[in-house]
Amino acid sequence: MSSVDLPISPSLFNATLIERHDLSEALSVVRIRPDGGELPPFEAGQYCTVGLPKDAQERAAYPANDPRRLIRRAYSIASPPHRREELELLVIRVDQGQLTRRLWELAPGARLFVDPKIRGEFTLREVPAGSDLIMVATGTGLAPFMSILREHWHRPGWPLQTASDFRRWRRFVIIHGVRKESDLAYRAELESLAREDPDFHYIPILSGGREGDGWAGLRGRAPIALDPPTYRQIVGSEIDPRTSHVFLCGNPSMITDVQKLLEGRGFVTHSKRQLGNIHFERYW
Ligand SMILES: Cc1cc2nc3c(=O)[nH]c(=O)nc-3n(C[C@H](O)[C@H](O)[C@H](O)COP(=O)(O)OP(=O)(O)OC[C@H]3O[C@@H](n4cnc5c(N)ncnc54)[C@H](O)[C@@H]3O)c2cc1C
Ligand SMILES: NC(=O)c1ccc[n+]([C@@H]2O[C@H](COP(=O)([O-])OP(=O)(O)OC[C@H]3O[C@@H](n4cnc5c(N)ncnc54)[C@H](OP(=O)(O)O)[C@@H]3O)[C@@H](O)[C@H]2O)c1
């Protein structure tokens, strides 16, 4: 098969790339506008599916308007449900990645596919109001927590009402583990919220870098913040399985490790069959 660019039907595309704002050489905030001006309704914490054309050779096996001509990948939505005019995603370019490699080649205005069905169970739906929410993210696993936070903090009408009118949690803690400081996406927004609200705690943790590089925060991997004395010192409370729900998102090995750690401390993994207080979204 030659590598000539086989046509792909314009009808496979239903959205436009507005911007890829680079936070570092591999990490970007991506904004996408759906045709028709509005996304379907969705819940904070859910994900969408984005599609881009496969290489010409791969797509040659399918007719021009066949969706199998697209590579599709899931992305947690970082924007809140009341901002349906565009999607905001936090995406890392994976080395040798199929879709992310292509995404980094696009310029604003490029056409792409966004599955009109938005999916996912990683939401606050089954979490009792008034719980302590402890969100543990590695890398881009921060995205769904931004949607959940923003749903409550940046509603239309804000700041006319007070924070407590909106809040359906007692404390909200974000633990974000990344390799280097430039991977701390949304840091300014989260630091600003933490200054405003004494019940919101933002705990960034670096696994890379070294002493003397100017980093004054915690070093290591995200779970160190769940160590009781460390957590107590930063948040000023205990991690209590009777009142806390822990959400884990990102690297699957972090999820497995933290799940094991918390189950040993009386937490129960949430599933369709059993209400629990450990919730997770594996990215791969
Ligand atoms: C429910 C869900 C939500 C997701 N949300 C996001 C998101 O908000 N942002 C995001 O960047 N990715 C997210 N992902 C991952 C995303 O779907 C793709 O897997 C990722 O962008 C790589 O796609 P690719 O085609 O470039 O790489 P592929 O060719 O598919 O290679 C994938 C390999 O890269 C690794 N990998 C995949 N995703 C990541 C990642 N984020 N960080 C580190 N290594 C990774 C894994 O080893 C995986 O096997 C999510 C995945 C799921 C299932
Ligand atoms: N981040 C970058 O600068 C960069 C640059 C170019 C390309 N990429 C591509 O992007 C991909 C994703 O990189 P990423 O840095 O966002 O994601 P990642 O590899 O999942 O690492 C994010 C954070 O998760 C930590 N982690 C890994 N396993 C863990 C565990 N079991 N428990 C707790 N924490 C754990 C890592 O710590 P450790 O550091 O200790 O592993 C790191 O702090 C890479 O695989 C690469 O393909 C990334």
Image: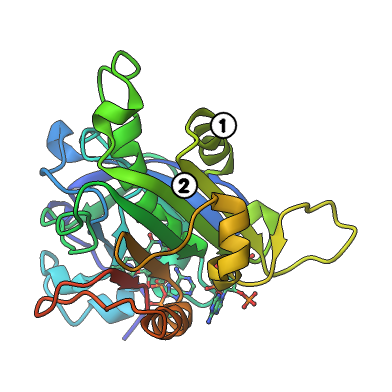
Q: Is residue 84 left or right of residue 239?
A: left
Q: Quadrant of the C terminus?
A: bottom left
Secondary element type, mark 1: helix
Quadrant of picture, ligand 2: bottom right
Q: Is residue 265 left or right of residue 231?
A: left
- Relative to 3, is 277 above or below? above
Q: Residue at x 32, y 80 (%)?
A: 57
**Amino acid type, residue under disc 1 in the picture:** Arg
Give the residue pinned by disc 2: 29
Q: Which residue is mark 1?
A: 195
> What residue is drawn where x is 17% and y is 74%?
68
Residue 11, above or below 281: above
Residue 203 x/y as whole percent: 58, 53
Find the residue positioned furthest to the top. Answer: 160
Report how many numbered discs are placed on residues in the image. Answer: 2
Front residue (pair 66, 75) = 75
Q: Quadrant of the N terminus?
A: bottom left
Write down the quadrant of residue 195 in the picture.
top right
- Residue appearing at x 17%, y 77% in the figure: 271
Residue 200 placement (x, y as % from top left):
46, 42
The secondary element bearing badge 2 is classed as strand
Position in image of residue 245 (x %, y %): 31, 62
Where does the image place residue 212, in percent across and percent down from the top left?
A: 90, 58
For label 1, the crowd category at 10 Å Cα-Cα, with few meaning under 14, some 14 to 19 and many 20 or more, is: few
Which amino acid is tagged 2? Val
